[in-house]
Image: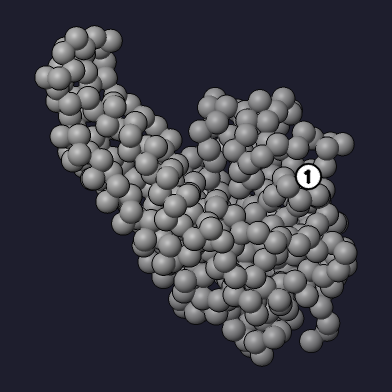
Amino acid sequence: MTGTPDFLQEAQKIKDEIIQLRRTIHQHPELGQTETETQKLVEAYLRKLGITTRRIAGTGVLGLLEGGKPGTTVGLRADMDALKIQERTGVPYASRRPGIMHACGHDCHTAGLLGAAKLLAAAKADVPGNVKFFFQPDEEGSGGAAPMIAAGGLENPQVTAMFGAHVNSGIPAGYVGMRPGKYYAASNPFDITIRGVGAHGAHPDLGVDAIAVACQAVGALQLCISRETDPVDAALISVCTFHAGNQRNALADEAVLTGIIRTLDPKTRIKTVAAVRRIVDGIAGSFGATAEINIHEGYPGLINDPAMTELARRSVGALLGEDKLFPITQPSLGTEDFGIFLEHVKGCFYQIGVANPAKTPTVSLHNSEFNVDEDALPILSAAHSQVAWDYLLSAI
């Protein structure tokens, strides 16, 4: 072993290349399960590095770097899909596709992981094991992690730890945030149809007003959170769409609600899902209506392995300096299907700071004006490389 490469210094040398990759992907955003151009870009780039690739989960790419030293296999993951948002950043490299934008930073994730692939490929002879690069489709949709796993992505060779990252506009550029344990929420999307009886608006006594019943249900679901959830736990029920009626003088005979349940604790998840069914069924029945309730299994919670989080913390602290570690004290009720990987192997998901008000407005993810300080991109590449390297060394 010739020693650990200076990944941060090497990443700075290819900074312009990483930024150009990001901008190319940003200009050509693709929705989940349609990432064909991004897939081709990733494949071509990895193959030039001597990394073998295979297509997986439809529009995903799995790259394998076989190191020159014996050891185990670590996985690094980036998601590739964009969102149905019209970009309003005004930057020269803005999306060329109307109504589609990389407003969640997946262009950064993909470019950053390609950068890490180049850094690790350059040190291939001394890599103590293997690195698998998971370029995942459809994180914003129905999820791409599970299909990658089902297609054998974690096997041959067997991945023993996974690491991933997300850009974060709440953290200053140059910093990396981490949190052990519960980090992201589990999700349960739902579709609820309240069926009443239509009637003339002048004779509500002859019908069952689906809108009135649905309104009662929406209010009661909020009461469920305040009165049935442990105050020191966290859960959220969001009714995000409400469609009913088509005539101003007729009672609606049907109201359709859609939304999502978010929970951090597995027991709270089970309890809250059951409560939604009980409350909506009970309210509908009490007013003479019926309810069709479909609650789906979304992403599991993302729970960082404490030991792997400590390894990542030490790695990034050594790379950037301990003062560049950003403490994350609270979990998020956002969802992230990287948690599915962590149900199969130990690992850690961390945050890359991209906020710099002097360069770009600081707005939240999923905002039409979302942009990043691109100086953070080589930090993402270097962090992935250092964490993967240190894990492989620790596993010898």
Left or right of 217 in this view: 383: right
What percent of the width, then of the height, locates residue 386? 75, 71
The structure residue drawn at horizontal position 53% and vertical position 27%, both measured from the top left corner, is 99
Position above or below: 267 against 167: below
The structure residue drawn at horizontal position 33% and vertical position 26%, both measured from the top left corner, is 243
On the question of residue 162 being in view, the answer is: yes
Position above or below: 285 against 1: above
Left or right of 14 in this view: 104: left
Q: Which residue is mark 1?
A: 355
Which one is in front, 392 or 315?
315
The structure residue drawn at horizontal position 77% and vertical position 73%, both measured from the top left corner, is 315
Left or right of 329 in this view: 295: left
Element type where label 1 sits in the image: strand
The structure residue drawn at horizontal position 48% and vertical position 65%, both measured from the top left corner, is 265
Amino acid type of the residue tagged 1 in the rendering: Ala
What percent of the width, then of the height, locates residue 60? 48, 55
Which one is in front, 253 or 49?
253
How many numbered badges does the structure rendering display?
A: 1
What percent of the width, then of the height, locates residue 335? 52, 53
**Which quadrant: the N terminus?**
bottom right
Which one is in front, 238 or 219?
219
Position above or below: 130 against 147: below
